Image (cartoon, grey):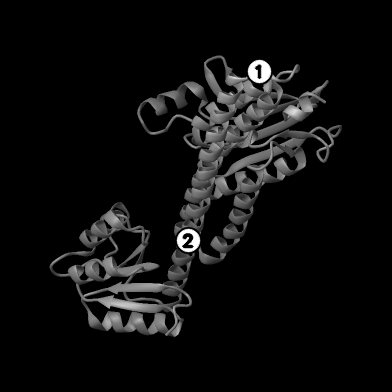
């Protein structure tokens, strides 16, 4: 038997269940190992690499919850629980100890194969993402070391001031931009994992395609200082769609662009809008009950591009209270955007500005509006600054 689709460890104290599962999986080209108890399963798992573990809950010596906890101490292999229990407490416990899913006994062959396929596919995506993030982290460290070296050279000699300043500006922008990519990738991965667990396989496959495009787009953007407005709008539409899936929210979203704006000509800094929209969705709309709306207006105001992000969420004051009680982390992506604005403004006559306004009617909170104003002819590099 070749290991074409993946390697699976079955743990069950009932040999009949093992035989049934092994037959189904082997016939569908999966490689299978098995264990009749928890200690034996831990020994096998420690000596081999598996793509998935199917783990019974009720077993002598050591139950499935205990086995899963020990596995998760040293391994990221996904665990699907096998259970005849259908009470909420058992299901919650399964996810608490690190399980990614559960399958009820007696097994339905189609459901079993669908869940196995989905979680093995997700594990492969996780592995790929970990590799990509490691590459980006290495790239960031290299960029920061290069930046440090350039600053030292800048201080040591005034004869090459212009050359050092060029490298300094471009490296600072790339370093800050690279920091945002792992943040976005991990948020999107969390979105995909929720969809894979809660939605059916057909819907999950559709989202896989959208997710892959977003990741490739994000990685491509890390190599450039700017993006065409047309591409940024397409990117935002895909991102908002993913967030609606992940949070299972019915958000009425709309992007309006003035007809006089040529989206195929206007260039803007990469990764400027997405963190602001993420903030509106996560901190404004997610906690809100009732109708949720997100409006993005893109207008031309003289020699500037004006972007308005308007949500009807809970407002900044209520969101700040939620952050204080520990349920939300501080948005470091927002801080990076502010740092990038400072760099652009340092080398451009026309400045980028950002303003956040609380929308209210008397004492009633109506939401939040973020206004971002960007010069239409923003200079993105030292070469443009000196041209």
Report which quarter residue 213 is drawn in.
Answer: bottom right
Answer with the quarter of the image where residue 157 lies.
Answer: top right
Is 367 above or below relative to 252? above
Q: Is residue 96 above or below residue 25?
A: above
Give coordinates of residue 345: x percent, y percent: 68, 19
Can you name the residue that lies furthest to the right here? 260
113 left or right, relative to 163: left
Residue 290 vertical placement versus 216 (above, below): above
Q: Residue at x 63, y 31 (%)?
A: 173
**Mark 2 or 1, closer to the camera:** 1
Q: Is residue 323 visible?
A: yes
Q: How far, Cα to Cα, is label 2 from label 1?
A: 53 Å
| Percent of width and height locating residue 272 | 64, 33
Contact between marks 2 and 1 (CB within 8 A): the answer is: no
Earlier in the chain: of badge 2 and badge 1, it is 2
* Residue 246 location (% of width, % of height): 51, 49
Labels in figure, total = 2
Q: Is residue 367 left or right of residue 50?
A: right
Identify which residue, 277 or 228, lies in the foreground. 228
Residue wearing tag 1: 158
**Left or right of residue 15: residue 281:** right
In the displayed image of the protein, which residue is found farthest to the left?
A: 61
Q: Position of residue 67 (x, y in %)?
A: 23, 62
Category of crowding for the residue at label 1, using alpha-carbon neighbours closer than 10 angstroms: few (below 14), some (14–19), many (at least 20): few
- Labelled disc at residue 189: none
Disc number for residue 122:
2
Residue plotted at (54% across, 61% down): 204
- Please identify the residue farthest to the top as the structure is shown: 362
Q: Secondary structure at mark 2?
A: helix
At label 2, counting other C-alpha atoms closer than 10 Å, the crowd grade (few under 14, some 14-19, many 20 or more) is: some
Q: Nearer the viewer, residue 264 or 348?
A: 348
């Amino acid at each position: 038997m070749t290991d074409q689709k993946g390697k699976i460890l079955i743990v069950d104290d009932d040999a009949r269940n093992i035989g049934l599962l092994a037959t189904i999986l082997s016939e569908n080209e999966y490689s299978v190992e098995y264990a009749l108890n928890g200690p034996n399963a831990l020994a096998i798992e420690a000596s081999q690499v598996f793509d998935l573990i199917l783990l019974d809950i009720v077993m002598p010596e050591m139950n499935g919850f205990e086995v899963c906890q020990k596995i998760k101490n040293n391994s990221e292999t996904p665990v699907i629980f096998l259970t005849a229990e259908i009470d909420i407490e058992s299901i919650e416990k399964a996810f608490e100890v690190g399980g990614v899913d559960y399958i009820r006994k007696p097994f339905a062959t189609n459901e079993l194969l669908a869940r196995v396929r989905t979680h093995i596919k997700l594990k492969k995506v996780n592995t790929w993402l970990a590799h990509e993030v490691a590459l980006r982290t290495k790239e960031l460290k290299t960029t920061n070391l290069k930046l440090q070296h350039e600053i030292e050279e800048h201080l040591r000699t005034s004869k090459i001031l212009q050359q050092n300043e060029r490298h300094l500006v471009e490296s600072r922008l790339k370093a800050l931009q690279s920091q945002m990519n792992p943040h976005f990738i991990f948020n999107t991965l969390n979105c995909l994992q929720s969809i894979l667990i809660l939605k059916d396989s057909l819907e999950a496959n559709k989202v896989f395609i959208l997710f892959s495009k977003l990741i490739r787009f994000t990685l491509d953007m890390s190599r450039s200082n700017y993006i065409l407005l047309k591409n940024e709008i397409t990117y935002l539409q895909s991102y908002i769609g993913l967030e609606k899936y992940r949070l299972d929210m019915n958000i009425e979203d709309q992007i309006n662009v003035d007809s006089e704006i040529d989206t195929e000509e206007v260039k803007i800094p990469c990764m400027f809008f997405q963190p602001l929209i993420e903030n509106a969705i996560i901190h404004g709309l997610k906690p809100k009950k009732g109708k949720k709306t997100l409006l993005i207006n893109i207008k031309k105001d003289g020699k500037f591009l004006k972007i308005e992000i308007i949500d009807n969420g809970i407002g900044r004051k209520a969101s700040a209270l939620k952050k204080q009680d520990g349920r939300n982390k501080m948005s470091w992506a927002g801080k990076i955007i502010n740092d990038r604005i400072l760099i652009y403004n340092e080398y451009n006559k026309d400045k980028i500005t950002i303003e956040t306004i609380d929308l209210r009617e008397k004492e009633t909170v109506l939401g939040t509006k973020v206004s971002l104003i960007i010069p239409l002819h923003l200079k993105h590099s030292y070469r443009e600054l000196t041209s």
